[in-house]
Amino acid sequence: MRSIIQSSALVASALGAALASAPMPVSAADQAGFNPHGFKLPTGVYRCELNRSVNVREVSADLSSAVVQFDRKEYRMQAVGARSGALRYEDPKSGLVWLVISTKSMLLDTKHGRQLANECKT
C-alpha cells in the first residue's frame, strides 16, 4: 500500500511539474538549450506500465518534431523547451505532451490533467 501511495505522489508531482512548466517553442537558435543532456529519442514501440504502449513513428533529424501514435491515433508533435532539461513534445490541438528523460518517457493529457502512459521504455 505504501508503494502505491508513493507512486501516486511521484506521478502527481511529475504531472504537476509538466503542466506548470511554461513551454517555449524550439527554434534552430535555441537547439543547444533544448536538449542540454543530449537525450535521444529513438523511434519504435515504447512499452509502458499497465500494458500500455506508445509508438514513436518518426523523429525529425534535428529533434524538432515527432510523430507519436497512441490509442489508435497519430499525433504530430512539436518540440518545446522545458526548464527541467527533459525533451518535451506537444500537440496543442489534443493537449498531449510526450516527455523524455534519461531512463523513461511518459505521455500526458494536459487538457484533462492526467497521465496516459508512464515508465515507457524502448
Image (cartoon, helix red, strand yellow):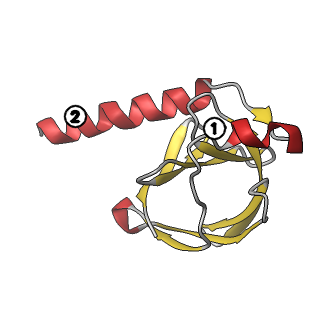
Q: In the figure, is residue 1 to the left or right of 114?
A: left
Quadrant of the drawing holding the N terminus: top left
SS at badge 1: loop
CA separation in Å, label 1 and label 2: 22 Å
Query: What is the number of the mark on residue 110?
Result: 1
Where residue 92 sits: x, y (%)?
79, 43
Q: In the figure, is residue 21 to the left or right of 95?
A: left
Question: What amino acid does circle 2 point to?
Answer: Ile
Neighbour tally class for label 2: few under 14, some 14-19, many 20 plus, Cα within 10 Å: few
Q: Is residue 71 visible?
A: yes
Sequence-first tag of 1 and 2: 2
At x 35%, y 62%, the residue is 50
At x 78%, y 57%, the residue is 65
Where residue 110 sits: x, y (%)?
63, 38
Question: What amino acid does circle 1 point to?
Answer: Thr
At x 38%, y 68%, the residue is 51
Q: How many marks?
A: 2
Residue underneath mark 2: 5
